[in-house]
Amino acid sequence: KKAEEAKKAEEAKKAEEAKKADAARKAKVNPTPDPAATRDRQIAEAIKRRAAEAATPSADDQIASAVQRRAAQIGGGGGNGAQGPLSTGPGSGAGGGTIIGAEYILYKRRMETRIRDAWVWPGADESLESVVRFSVTPEGNIRDVRTTRGSGDQAYDASAERAVQSASPLGVVPERYHQEFADVEMTFRARDLPQ
């Protein structure tokens, strides 16, 4: 009987040791998450995501790059150059106006976005349209805001002027384009307002 009891005790001891060994193996495979380690891992993942976002070019950067590539293709030498540089202004065909670059396009886009974001008009008549003229100083301050073609609704026209005024200052105008922003005209269409 003692031998049997000793054998059972030995088997129980071995079973207990096997359980402990199995639990230890499982703990190594699926350890109990440490809150500090979990937080550190989440922070590291967030930093990686931010770095990836920063490495992705913004829409403005993509536009600037595309404009520069196109300018190089059509006016930068080495290509056929038959079409001339990008230009704005009166006339037809290439070369009839002022040569523009990425800085101009980006500044104009930012200016228009800031003004449109500031524009609030609670009316319902989507047919209204007005034209506002203003100047931008080299330092980026908006001056001489005036409606040059009214919509017939004074409140509507005033809302467009307020949007232009509230966007000031815009930031320094690129040096090459001081003259282009000295006299700016912008059309405000009620149908373009977000619903």
Image (cartoon, rainbow, N blue to C red):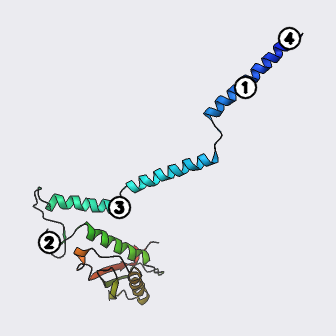
Front-most of 181 and 91? 181
The residue to which callout 1 is attached is 19
The residue to which callout 3 is attached is 59
- Residue at 42% x, 55% y is 53
- x and y percent of residue 63 in the render? 30, 62
4 vs 3, front mark: 4
Front-most of 122 and 71? 71
Left of 173 or right of it: where is 30?
right
Q: Earlier in the sequence, mark 2 or mark 1?
A: 1
* Callout 3 amino acid: Ala
Front-most of 104 and 133? 104
User: Label 1 vs label 3: CA separation?
Assistant: 59 Å
Q: Earlier in the sequence, mark 4 or mark 3?
A: 4
* Callout 4 amino acid: Glu
User: Label 3 vs label 2: CA separation?
Assistant: 29 Å
User: Label 2 vs label 1: CA separation?
Assistant: 87 Å
Report if residue 142 is visible in the image.
yes
**Disc 4 residue crowd, few under 14, some 14–19, many 20+, Cα 10 Å:** few
- Residue at 65% x, 31% y is 26
**Disc 3 residue crowd, few under 14, some 14–19, many 20+, Cα 10 Å:** few
Left of 67 or right of it: where is 19?
right
* Callout 2 amino acid: Ser
The residue to which callout 4 is attached is 4
Q: Earlier in the sequence, mark 4 or mark 2?
A: 4
1 vs 3, front mark: 1
The residue to which callout 2 is attached is 92
- Residues at badges 3 and 2 in contact (C-beta under 8 Å)? no
